[in-house]
Amino acid sequence: MHPAVEVKHLSYRYDDGPEVLKDVSFTIERGEWISIVGHNGSGKSTLLKLIGAIHPVTNGEVWVNGIKVIEDTFSEIHEHVGIVFQNPDNQFVGATVEDDVAFGLENYGVPYEIMHERVKEALNDVDMGEFLTHEPHHLSGGQKQRVAIAGVIALRPNIMILDEATSMLDPEGRGEILDVIRKLQREKGLTVIHITHHLEETLQSDRIFVMNKGELILCGTPEDIYMHGGTLIEIGLDLPFEMKLNRLIFNEDAFVTEMELLNKL
């Protein structure tokens, strides 16, 4: 089986501007949860647009499930990759929740009977089944994001990209949305690429990719990455509370859980 994503010597610039990605290479295996972190301008959002076939690849290669991402394969890539963006309001096009989730299916010509069942299934998957006839703009922020997720999973991609998808929510709302995604990942065998600047959201990742000024500077498990707390701080990232406190009290960089930290005190 092909990996979910292969990126080979990928570089990118907008028009005549500076390079925003510089010789980036990595592989993501099927079923992995990958968190990509970096300060604003690090290149992480450009990276997702190249993987998701939003921008054309101009220098290097991107492969999704063994399909090379070129303009001729954009439509095929869109069948494999679903993207949940930062602001769900920008994704709403229907007058009701049901209409909105059905929009993508209509574009793909899914027959009405099948479409109706898939809309209900997707909304039930994100605990929004009772909101079929509600207007999206009257929902809470967390509910809106659940509807946006339902619109993606109704299309049945096998790779889901979260583009700062929790950044407009409070900590409790962020946790609830991530719990929903983790449940979907388990049930549907999704590969998840989670772009975030909240490092506490990365602690359950399989691997973390750290971007800075267009380069992939660190790649590894959370246990590996949080050994480099000084580097993360240096590039403008805020350590999770447990790691920050461990650094302050014990003057060491390490991956520690809340319980492990309490046992050390």
Image: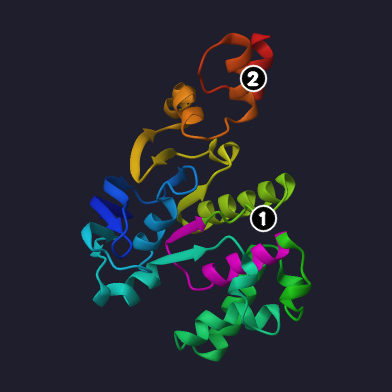
Tell me the element at label 1. Answer: loop
Image location of residue 132, percent across then percent down: 72, 78
The C terminus - image quarter: top right
Whether the magenta-drawn stretch holds residue 120 is answered as no
**In the image, what residue type sits under mark 2?**
Leu
Image location of residue 103, percent across then percent down: 56, 83
Say the numbered circle drawn on residue 168.
Answer: 1
CA gap between label 2 and label 1 equals 26 Å
Residue at image point 55% right, 54% down: 164
Quadrant in which residue 93 is drawn: bottom right
Q: What is the residue that sits farthest to the front in this orientation?
A: 16
Q: Between residues 213 and 82, which one lies in front from this camera angle?
A: 213
Q: What scheme was used to colour the molecule? A: rainbow
Image location of residue 142, percent across then percent down: 71, 59
Q: Taking 115 as reference, is 143 left or right?
A: right
Quadrant in which residue 212 is drawn: top left
Identify the residue under disc 2: 245
Number of other residues with Cα within 10 Å of mark 2, as a class: few under 14, some 14 to 19, many 20 or more:
some
**In the image, what residue type sits under mark 1?**
Met
Q: Earlier in the sequence, mark 2 or mark 1?
A: 1
Q: Taking 191 as reference, is 131 left or right?
A: right
Whether the magenta-drawn stretch holds residue 156 is answered as yes
In the picture shown, does residue 212 fall above or below 2? Answer: above
Residue at image point 75% right, 79% down: 135
Q: Between residues 183 and 166, which one lies in front from this camera angle?
A: 166
Residue at image point 38% right, 67% down: 80
Say the numbered circle drawn on residue 58.
Answer: none
In magenta, the rendered stretch is 142-162
Tell me the element at label 2. Answer: helix
Residue at image point 51% right, 35% down: 236
Image location of residue 57, percent across then percent down: 26, 64
